[in-house]
Amino acid sequence: MSDSDPDVIVVGGGPAGLSGALFTQKNGLETTVFDTDETWMHKAHLFNYLGIGSRDGSAFMETAREQVDSFGVERRQEEVTDVTETDDGFRVETDDGEEDADYVILATGANRDLAESLGCDFDGDIVDVDVTMETNVADAYATGAMVRAEEWQAVIAAGDGAAAALNVLTKEKGEHFHDFDVPADADAVFESMADEE
């Protein structure tokens, strides 16, 4: 893998993918998201997402994208055509080229084609994962609607993305990892962002 390759590639830019990307990038892992912007959130209106109240799905996605961008996640508007294992991790292919990473988080909604071609186990029609969202393919994660039959909720998907990211971070840090911020942490982040502008 070259120095310019990310540590983590996320395939899919809905709530699961962006949540996973936020956690990994925020905690020091270079993260790239490949997204086609075909998330179901554009058809949604959130009344059932804790802490949101009432929010148009597209407006929610705009805020989510701004948040991950503020932490330095690289987002690419490209469709991933294949994901394969390499000696050092994974290779993601698009029509524009390929990129390698140590970890891959699949967050492609109900489209499970990439998980199938990667060799992930299935339980019926859904991708089989453990509680950390890791598949049988080490360091490959599946999230959201890929791993649930008809339980397609933005808040669940975001939690799945966070669970995958925390497991990646636990592996990288060599101990159980928590991402728990306190008000002083937020103040420091906002001061840092202001200094960069």
Image (cartoon, rainbow, N blue to C red):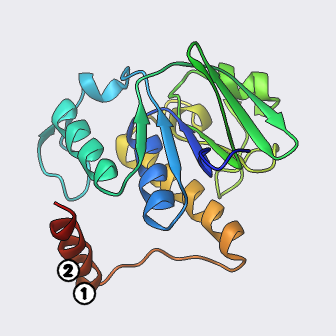
Q: Is residue 40 left or right of residue 99?
A: left
Q: How many marks?
A: 2
Residue with the most extreme top position: 95
Question: Which residue is farthest front?
Answer: 3
Instruction: Please report contact status of discs 2 and 1: CB closer than 8 Å, yes or no.
Output: yes
Q: Amino acid at mark 2?
A: Asp
Q: Please state the horizontal and vertical placement of residue 118, each as a whole percent of the image.
A: 78, 28
Q: Which secondary structure lies at badge 2?
A: helix
The relative height of residue 184 versus residue 68 in the rendered view (above or below) is below
Q: Is residue 160 left or right of residue 128?
A: left
Rendered residue at 38%/20% (across/down): 38
Mark seen at residue 187: 2
Q: CA distance from mark 2 to mark 1?
A: 5 Å
Given the image, on which type of amino acid does mark 1 rest? Ala
- Image quarter where the C terminus lies is bottom left
Q: Residue at x 27, y 52 (%)?
A: 67
Visible in this render: residue 121? no
Q: Residue at x 84, y 37 (%)?
A: 86
Q: Which mark is residue 184?
A: 1
Mark 1, other Cα within 10 Å: few <14 / some 14–19 / many ≥20: few
Q: Is residue 178 left or right of residue 136?
A: left
Instruction: Determine which of the numbered discs, if any, sits on residue 129 in the image.
Output: none
- Residue 78 or 64: which is nearer the viewer? 78
How busy is the neighbourhood of tag 2: few (under 14 within 10 Å), some, or many (20 plus)? Answer: few
